[in-house]
Every structure is written in structure tokens, then in C-alpha cells.
Image (cartoon, helix red, strand yellow):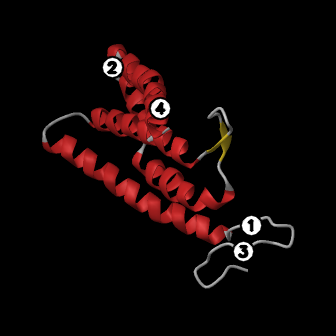
Amino acid sequence: MNGPNDAPTAHAHGQPERLAEWKLLLAAFAGGLLGSGARAGVQAAFAAVGLPAYGAHLTVNGLGAFAAGWLFARLAAADADGRPLGLPHLRRVREHLWSVGVLGGFTTVSGFAWDAAQAVGEGDHVRLVAILAFNGVVGIAAAAAGWKLGK
């Protein structure tokens, strides 16, 4: 059982007790509300100044990739050489809140797919290549830069 402040207690063999799944679900849900609200704000700002919706999607995906790299670098356990070993269980609430929740709600794979399909449907191959390249190449580079900054 957890104590009065939900601090994990150790089992007899010294391992911390696992967090209740409902806590992880609640953290992801709360983060998703925040992230989705932030994405809607970016989309509204782009629309207010006459910029296309795909520009807002590229922006949130690029920022989200950077933030995901930074977050993982901050939460991951590492070996003596700095290589990631994964997320310790006690950091799972933060991971669910910020990564699954906030960043999952903020970034938009469905928006990316919609933008690419729309570009294909309109025969705008230049926009299609830009959307694919940005989400792939720039997204990976942004995540790597976030990782480096987070270390």
C-alpha cells in the first residue's frame, strides 16, 4: 500500500510497489486536456493571421518532437556512459502526464495524415514533400536536439 502522501512503499524484497494504473490514466487524461488545449491555441493563432492549418500542425509537431526528446533525456535512467536504460517506474506518472498526455495531445499525427492526404488530393506535390520531410527529418532532428539539451 502507498502511504498517506501516495509515496511508494517497498515490498519485502526491497522493490517499490507499482503505481496504481488509475493514477497513470488520470495523469495521461489531465495532460491530454492541457496539450489539446495548447494545440487548439496554436491553430487559432495561425488562423487568426491567415496562415494555413498545416503550418500549425508542422509547428506543434516540431515543438512536440523537441520537447519529447528533452523530456526523455530528463526522465530516463542512464548507465555510466550516459546511454539511456529506460524509465524507472517511479517516473511513470510524470511520463504519462507530460509525454503521453501533454505532448500526445499537443502533437497531431491525425493532422499530419490529413494534411498529407489533402495535399495529394489537391495535386500539391511540393506541399506534400514539405509536410513529409518536415515531420520526418525535422521531427527526428528536433527530438535529437531536445535530447542533447536535456542531458
> Residue 144: x percent and y percent?
49, 29
Please tell me whether mark 3 sits on a helix, a strand or a loop: loop
Q: CA distance from mark 4 to mark 1?
A: 30 Å
At label 4, the amino acid type is: Lys
* Disc 3 to disc 1: CB gap under 8 Å: yes
Q: Residue at x 33, y 49 (%)?
A: 39
**Residues at circles 4 and 3 in contact by the CB criterion of under 8 Å:** no
How busy is the neighbourhood of tag 4: few (under 14 within 10 Å), some, or many (20 plus)? few
Sequence-earlier tag: 4 or 1: 1
Q: CA distance from mark 2 to mark 3?
A: 54 Å
Eye-nearest disc, 4 or 2: 4
Query: What residue does disc 1 label?
Result: 16
The residue positioned farthest toward the right in the image shown: 13
Determine the residue located farthest toward the top in the rendered image.
126
Give the structural element (helix, strand or loop) at label 4.
Answer: helix
Q: CA distance from mark 3 to mark 1?
A: 6 Å
- The part of the image, by quadrant, that contains residue 66 is top left
145 above or below 12? above
Find residue 3 and report its horizontal and vertical position in percent. 65, 82
- Judging by the rendered image, the residue that carries numbered circle 2 is 127
Tag 2 or tag 4, which sits nearer the N-term? 2
Which element type, helix, strand or loop, lies under badge 1?
Answer: loop
* Measured Cα–Cα span from mark 4 to mark 2: 30 Å
